[in-house]
Structures are given as C-alpha cells and as structure tokens.
Amino acid sequence: MGKRSMRRILTLILLLYLVLGAAYSVANPIFEGPDESLNYANVRYLVEERHLPVLEPDEPTKAHHPPLYYVLGAVLTHWVPNEYFDDIVNRENAFWAFDVGRYGVDNKSIYLHMPTLEGWPYRDVALGVHLIRWFSLLLGAGTVLLVYATARLIFPQRALPLVAAALVALNPMFLYIQGTVHDDALTNLLAAATLYGAAVIMVRGLSLRRAVILGGVVGLAALTKLTALLVVPTVGLALVWRSFVEEERRGWRKLLRLGGATALTALLVSGWWFVRNQRLYGEPTSMVRQVEAWGGTREGAPNLAAAFRELGFLLDSFWGAFGYGQVPMPSWVYGTMRLVSVIALTGLVIYWARRQSGRARWERPRMMMLLLLLLSAPVICFGVVFARMTMIDTADFGRYLFVSLAYLAPLYALGLTEVSSGRSVLFGVLFTMTALAVFGLAGVLYPAYAAPPMLSEQQVRARTRPVDLRFGDGIRLLGYDLSDDRVAPSGAVEATLCWQTLEPMEEDYVYFVHILGAEERIFGRRNTHPGLSRYPTSRWMPGDLFCDRLRVPVSDGVPAPAVYDVEIGWREPDAGDRLPIHDSSGRRLEFLSLDKVKTVPPVDRAIEVPKPVGASLDSKVTLRGYALDRTSVSQGETLDVTLYWAAQRPLDVDYTVFLHLASSEGSPHAQDDGQPRRGTYPTSFWDVGEIVIDPRQIRVPDDLPPGDYQVVAGLYILETGERLRWTKPGGTVRGDAVPLTTVSVELAP
C-alpha cells in the first residue's frame, strides 16, 4: 500500500468520523450526555461569574474538575444567551432509570425535551451546547490523528496505523462522548499527545526540547482532568528506559536532568491548580471533597465483589453504552466486540512468540521492553479504574480507558494484523466498525429519543383491540393489546396502548398501568410519560395518534395461580389527582379494568389430591377431589374444605362454585358460593389439565339441629343458575351436585 493510498484511507476515516460524529451530536438531545448539564453549567459559571467555581460539600457539580476545557468552552460561547437553561433542566423525567440495562427505547431520556427550545435553528442554550459539541468533535479528530501517528511511529507497517485509527474513530462510544459537552474530549486528546511524546522518546531518543514539550503537554492534561495523569507512569518508564538504552553509565544523570525538565515544566503549567485545591479543600486533588459531594464511597468499600460484578459493563461500555449507561447496545454487539478483543489478544501472543524465536538474542530484550511500555498505559489505566470501582459505584464506565487509546488501539491493531494480512484486516475493520457506528446511531441512539411514529386509525385498529375511552379533556385511548394473558411472578406484562390527542395540553400528564388484585392491592405497576417519555403531553398536537409498548413488572411475591385486573389511568404531574375517565357514551367510570392477566407458577408442581373423587361435570370440568379439616363440627364453627378442580377443555364461561352443607332432602343449610379462589381465579383462565386448588369455608349456623349432613359441591352459571351436570363415563347423568362426605354437627359446648 503506497503513501498516497494511506493518506486517502486516513482521510476517509476522518471524514467518516466527522460525519458520524456530527450525526451523533444532533441525534443526542442536549444534556443527555453524561454530566453534560453540569459541564455546561460550569462553562456558564465562568462566563457569568468570571472566576473559578468552588465545590460545595453537599452540592454535586463539576467545580472540582480542572478548568482548561471549560475555559475554552467559555471563550467559544461567551456571546451566546443562556435564558432557557433552567427551563430545560427542570423538565426532568422521573422514570428515566427504568430498566437501565435493557436495550430499547423505554424511558431512556433524562429530560422531557421540547423542540421549540432545543430544535433547529439552534439558539440560546441549544446553540451554546452544540457549538461546544462540535468543538469537542474536532478535538476527537486530533485524537484520531495522534493515534495514527503513534502507531505509525512504533509499527511502520502500512496497514496497522490505519487499523488503529479506524478502531478509535468509528468506535460508537468514542463518537458519542466526543460529540457531547464533556472534558473527556480534551482529556483524550492531551493523553494521546502525552503518549505520542513518550513514543517519540522511545523511538527517536531523548532531548531537552522533547522533554520540555512533553512536560508542557502533561501540564495541560493535568489542567483538564485527573484521569489524563493515568498515562504519566508510562512517560516515566519511557524516560527511564531510553536513558539507559542511550547511555548505560551516565543514564541516571541524563534521566534526572531531562526527567526533571519534564516534571518542572508540567508543574509550571499546572501546579497553581493543585496549590489552589490544597488551600480550598485541604488536599491537592479535591478528590475527598468530590466523593463526599457525590454521595460518598460505596457500601463495604473497598468492595472487590461489586467491582468484579461490574467488569462486564466496564468492558462493554468501552464500545457503547450511551447516556449514563441507560442506553446500551444489544448483547450481540458486545459479544462481537469481545470476540474481536480475544482475536487481538491471541494475535499479540502469536506476535510475541514469533519475534522471540526469529530475532537475534540481543534484540529480544529491546522488543520486550517496547511491548511492555506500550502495555503499561492500558494496564495501569485499567488497574486504577478497577481500584476506583471498588470504592465508588459510578466508576465503571469504559470511556475512562480512552486516555490509553494511543497505545491500546495500536496494540489491538497489532494483534489483528498478526492473525491475518494487514490489508484484509484493514478493510474488515473499516467495514465492521462503520457498520457498528451506523447501527449505534440509527439503531440505538436515535430511536431512544425520537418521538414515536404517528399512525392512522386504520393502522391502530389492525394491530390492537378497539376501545374508545377518554381521560380528561384531551386524551383518548383507541386501542390496546396484551402480548400474553399469562405471566410468571417476577415476570412482566407487555402492554400496547394507542393514544390520540383531542386538544392541546400545557401539563405533562403521567399514565399508569397497575396489576390489581383483591382489595385493590397492587402486584405490579408502571408509571410513565407517553411515548415512553419521548413524547410528553405538552408536545401533543390535535390528531396525533401513536402506540406505546411498555413492560409492567409483576412483583416476585404475587400469589399464583390467580387472575388480576389490568387497570390504567392518567394523573396530573407530581403524583396529582387522577384524570376523569369516560366511555364512548360519555358515562363517567370510577375504575377502568382494561383486561385481566393470569399469574402462573414458575414451575409445574405435582399436586396430591387427599381424597379423590373424579367427578366429571358436563365433560368440561373434573372435580378431582377434596380435603376436609374434620368430620365433626359444632354449631357456630367453621368447616374448612379444599376443592381440587381440573379443566377438561378450554372454558369460555366463568362458572360459580357452590359448596353446600345439605340435609338428607338436599336443601342447603349452610353454603359457600362464589368464584374460585375467592374471586381471583375465574374458570375461563384455567388451563387444560391444570389442578386448581380452591379453599372454601362453610360456617355452621348456630341453630342448626345436630345430626349428619352431606357436603356437596358443583358449578353453575351465575346469571341463569344452571348447574353443570355430574355424569358417568358413559354419559349417564347422576345429578347436578357431587356428594363429597358426611359431616356430623354437634351441639355447641
């Protein structure tokens, strides 16, 4: 591959980065990036107050971060108004943390966004945010070039530097974070510049000029973010190694002179910041005050077990987990990138083995030290991040490893090109990473915040069960559907609800879905803004029609099997009053049960029937048997009877159970009639072959004469009183009540 071809491919990589990065920055609503509202608030503080902020103990802000990025942002946007900042950040979405780790579009938005304040053409806050985002995007282009330059300096193979540049430029998480208002953008650039400077020293040797320039870059990095200093140990190792490679006897002298020049320059640039922190907070980094302000250390810190549990997220979020991690990529993406990592690591092992056997003995230590120096940056960075994870529960983001990209990406590229030819790896990586970046934009980020698609009434009718219900004056439910009417405890009900706007609304109303049991006990609930918080009611226009598909989790301890109402309703913001409900005729409804769902046990369990009966009722239901707590009972006492039923075929009628204490003539003296399981398990929900345990009670009247009485049971239709007939196997009718046993009633003591 010639130099011209390399330049063309590098230009293509940069163009892809800039186009995709700009698209990421536009698709991501303002302040949805991690800490973006706090970062922009820092910029505005500098613009309006004209001095550095101070971190207060109980006020989590970004005042503890070094100021360089924010100063540059303030210079860039000092002329931009900031009138609508509070209007935007006060519209928080209370439900954004629902199912944080689940791929999809359900409540991923931290704020309820208003296009009138945030949309194109940008103005006020939106303009300021996007100007700094685009500035950050340009800083990212510099990081990509430095990764390329570092890789080309150390590994001059034609394809490898381009592979390294593509791995960085088209990483969805890198594109995302570089397109937000975040000091990581400048941190990544200066960390890459630091590692490039260390690579220059490793390859080309030491000089006072290089030491001073490197010190200046380190100083600027320290004024941007402390994580940039994670690569400084690698700089020290490079200085030590090169000092003794060049001059073994006078190495210490040269190391002290040039290393001192590097350190002194860095301190001259950034030392004032650490002195300020010492005076304000009693320590130079402000880390203690930061941890206190942000909630303190995690429980049981240092908590190694928690840190190990979060390792998967650390590795996966390196490639893409947008926002605060609540907008993840699908699992197949993470599986693919883990496979790429395994291939790259295998390639590094192969590279090591081949070079060890193929090089002259005197060259082997040099090659080994070079690789160890390259590995030191990502290894030290990972070690510090992991140690921080044991102390703080918000330290597990893969983007913290980006400061080592200038060495990590070339190592990845080295491993991949060792497994296959450089040209095929280059085009394979270009295609794969471009596809991944496009999917991250179009398949993950954009849908998470975009308004739901508008539908016609015909489309709604075709995909849901039609209803016509009105909530308040402006909301209409046109259709609904449940994915299944069966759910396991700790599972979830999938509900589709289709809403139509009747008139404009100023408030952001919230709707709820409850899984409701007896005595209005709630066994599952969801609260959300419409559009799964992507389309709040204050944005609705008359005639809008769209559908929400949402998960309603069911509590782990819900009794099963049982049948529950699916209740829906709307309420005013901040847990206010419910909106009135009216049906299509205008009649006011006090309670709206949209449908019913059945909870089923998680596993089938063998049920032993104590006293078998095996009575078939109209070949629809079998009374399998019963259990009786006693056969002798006193006046005024209660007799506990458990009936065991089984459906022989699907039932479309909700039959009523009767359990009677009858005389010899058959008339009931005491009874317990009602829906099975105290009304919680209608027969229309019984599965064929399922044994239904139905506990019942008969209270013996105080004045019932002593004697023997039959206990009989059966089923009937409540509306007509018609009983199911008890039949023999051949079809002969034996009656409409199944005798179970005889009970002796005695005088009350």
Image: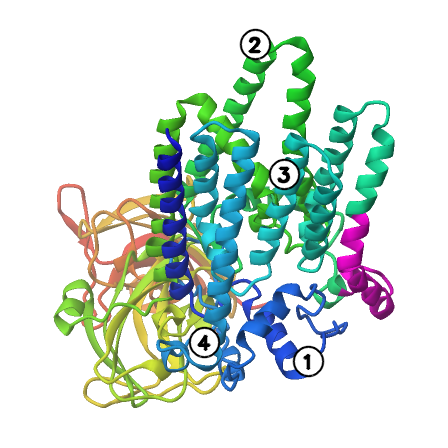
Q: Are marks 1 and 3 in contact (CB under 8 Å)?
A: no
Which of the two labelled residues, at mark 4 and mark 2, occupies the earlier sequence position?
A: 4
Q: To which residue does mark 4 refer?
A: 126
Q: Secondary structure at mark 3?
A: helix
Q: How many marks?
A: 4
Mark 2 secondary-structure assignment: helix
Return the residue nearer the eye: 205 or 522: 205
Q: Nearer the viewer, residue 292 or 185?
A: 185
Magenta residues (range) = 263-289
Q: Earlier in the sequence, mark 3 or mark 2?
A: 2
Foreground mark, 1 or 3? 1
Residue picked out by circle 3 = 378
Q: Disc 4 marks which amino acid?
A: Ala
Amino acid at circle 3: Pro
Residue drawn at 63 percent across, 38 percent down: 378
| Label 1 to label 3: alpha-carbon separation | 37 Å
Kind of element beneath mark 1:
loop
Q: What's the CA distance linking mark 3 and mark 2?
A: 27 Å
- Give residue 50's mark: 1
In front: label 3 or label 2 = 2
Distance between the Cα atoms at labels 4 and 1?
22 Å
- State whether the magenta stretch is mostly helix, strand or loop: helix
2 or 1: tag closer to the N-terminus? 1
Residues under numbered marks 3 and 2 in contact, where contact means CB atoms less than 8 Å apart: no
Horizontally, is 733 left or right of 589 in the view? Answer: left
